[in-house]
Image (cartoon, grey):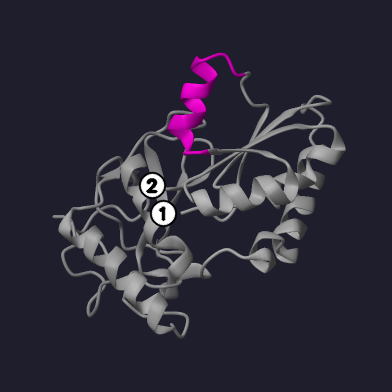
Amino acid sequence: QHRRRGVEHGDPDAGIAARDPVRLVQGDARRRSMISAHLRLNGILQDRLTPEQKAALDAVAEKMRSGAYSFESPPCPTCGGRRFAPLTERDRYGLDHSVVSCLDCGLFQTSPRLDEAALSDFYQRHYRALYGGAPDETTVRSVAAEQRGRIALDAVGAQKTVPPGARIVEIGCGAGAQLSMFGPAGCDVVGYDFDKRFLEMGRKAFGVDLRFGGLEALREDIEKGDPKPDVVLYIHVF
């Protein structure tokens, strides 16, 4: 028996079948074993929300509950494994956001996750209202985003298997502030995002190749002849 998706209240175990606390199989309900009790889906919000944030949160939760947002549970993208251990059941706003660890390779990943159509709707209609408001010069040139970009650049540079002039692709790039740190280092960079406003402002601010879409768009571009990326970045994505 699967529980409803969205913001839950009351008993976090309501509707969850009693199963093995370690093993997760694709499509199963979330298990009861969490790395910390506060990460269970109990409807407790971590932040004080503005009216705009509350409206966005309610809209997303309703789409999750009603089935307007579809979920998918693919195998691990790194090793193809289907055995997972649960880490979290919710995000900081109380939304159903299960993060698991692959028991075969250890990769942390969201599962189940919103499918491509649901992600597109979420990022175009609700993400900015929930997380930070409309784009402006301050949010586009975020100091924190550029700092995260430098950290990512240092991490990639430390990998001896990454070739000089590597092709770096970021999924969920926003305006490209993080990705822009890689261009001066000699990397070939491309970013994908569902927020057209941020993409346009980022192109003007950083001169980076930013494209609309997510993984499906990346896959289509590769099929059309784009080179495969050497590194794919995911930084603060749903």
Q: Hey, what amino acid is under mark 1?
A: Gln
Residue 176 sits above or below residue 222 on the image: below
Q: Start and end of the magenta stretch?
A: 212-226
Question: Which residue occupies 41% across, 54% down?
Answer: 124
* Residue hosting label 1: 124
**Of helix, strand and loop, which one carries label 2?**
helix
Question: Which residue occupies 86% across, 38% down?
Answer: 185
Residue 111 vs residue 52, the one in the foreground? 52
* Image spot of residue 89 (x, y percent): 37, 62
Question: Which residue occupies 35% across, 51% down?
Answer: 121
Asked whether residue 81 is drawn in magenta, I would say no
Residue contact at pointers 2 and 1, CB within 8 angstroms? yes
Instruction: Give the position of the N terminus as an image quadrant.
Output: bottom left
Residue 46 sits above or below residue 189 on the image: below
Q: CA distance from mark 2 to mark 1?
A: 6 Å
Q: Hey, what amino acid is under mark 2?
A: Ser
**SS assignment for the magenta stretch, majority:** helix
User: In which quadrant of the rendered view does residue 122 lie?
Assistant: bottom left
| Label 2 crowd bin: few (<14), some (14–19), many (20+), radius 10 Å | some
**Of helix, strand and loop, which one carries label 1?**
helix
* Image spot of residue 47 (x, y percent): 47, 81
Residue 11 vs residue 228, the one in the foreground? 228
* Residue hosting label 2: 120
Question: Which residue occupies 44% across, 61% down?
Answer: 127
- Residue 158 appears in the figure: no
Residue 84 sits above or below residue 95 on the image: above
